[in-house]
Image (cartoon, rainbow, N blue to C red):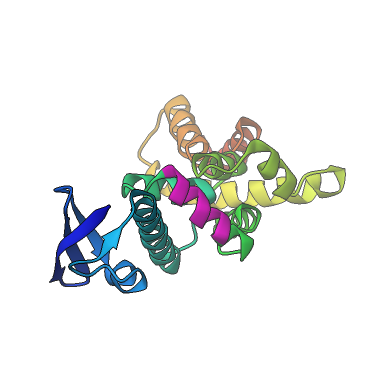
Amino acid sequence: MITVIQSVNKGKTYTVTLSNNDSVKLSEYAIFRHSIFPGGKFSEKSWHQILADADNHACYEKLLRLLSSKAHTEFEIKKKLTGSGFSKESINNVVQKAKNINLINDEYFAKTFFEARRSSGRYGRLKIVHDLKRRGISSELIKNILPDGDSNYHKENKIEFENALKLGHVKMKSLFRERDLMKRKAKLMRHLAARGFTSDICYRVINQLESRHGE
C-alpha cells in the first residue's frame, strides 16, 4: 500500500509526498477527484491508475490551450505534447478524443491552409505543399485536397501565373539598377522559386516582365 504523507498546495498544483519516498506534483483536479489527502492509502495498481488519469487530464488541458491559440495538425499537437513530457499513451488518448469531436481535423486544416495561402497571392503551389508536409499532412491527403484535374488545370495555372506575376513585378522594382540581363533574370528566378512557383511559371513571368521593362 502507498500512504499519502503530505500534500502541499503550491498555486494550482499540489506537491504530494508518499510513504515510498516519492514526491509528485498533481493538479487540483487529481487531488479532489481521487481524494488524495494526508493519511490516504492506495494500492499500487490504483495509484498508477490515478497517475495515468492525472496525466490524461493535464495532457487534454494542454491540448485545449494549444488549439485555443490557433489550429494545429495532429502531427504538430503530438510533437508539442511530447515536448511537454506527457506519456505516449496519454497523448494518443487525448488526440483521439479531440479528433472524435473535430477539434483536430487534418483534412479541414489542409483545405483552409491551402486556400488561405493561395488567396494571399504570396506563395506558389510547391511552397504550400512543402509547408503542409512539414506540418505532417500526408501526400495522399494533400493530393485529395488540391484542385487538380483537367477541368481545373487552366484555372489553377492562371491563378499561379497571376500571383507570380504580381510578385515578380514588385521584385523588378528593386532590380532596376541591375544592368546585367542574366543576373537580373537569375535573381528574379530565385525570388519566385523560393516562394514555390514552378520553373515553367517562373520563366513565363520573367519573359513577360522583361518584355515590358525592356532589356
Residue under the point 43% across and 61% down:
60
Please indicate, yes or no, whether residue 162 appears anywhere in the rendered image: yes
Q: Give the left or right position of residue 53, taking residue 32 as reference.
A: right
Q: In screen coordinates, is 23 left or right of 130?
A: left
Nearest the camera: 211 or 63? Answer: 63
Residue at (50% x, 33% y) in the render: 189
The answer to if 49 sits in the magenta stretch is no
Q: Which residues are magenta?
A: 88-97
Give the percent coordinates (x, y) of residue 115. 62, 58
In this rendering, position of residue 24 left or right of residue 8 = right
Of residue 105 and residue 165, the one placed in the foreground of this image is 105
Q: Is any part of residue 172 visible from this angle?
A: no
Examine the residues drawn in magenta and state their main secondary structure: helix
Q: Position of residue 118 (x, y in %)?
A: 60, 54
User: Is 104 on the left-hand or right-hand side of 107?
Assistant: left
Report the number of discs. Answer: 0
Identify the residue at the far top of this view: 182
As for residue 92 lying within the magenta part, the answer is: yes
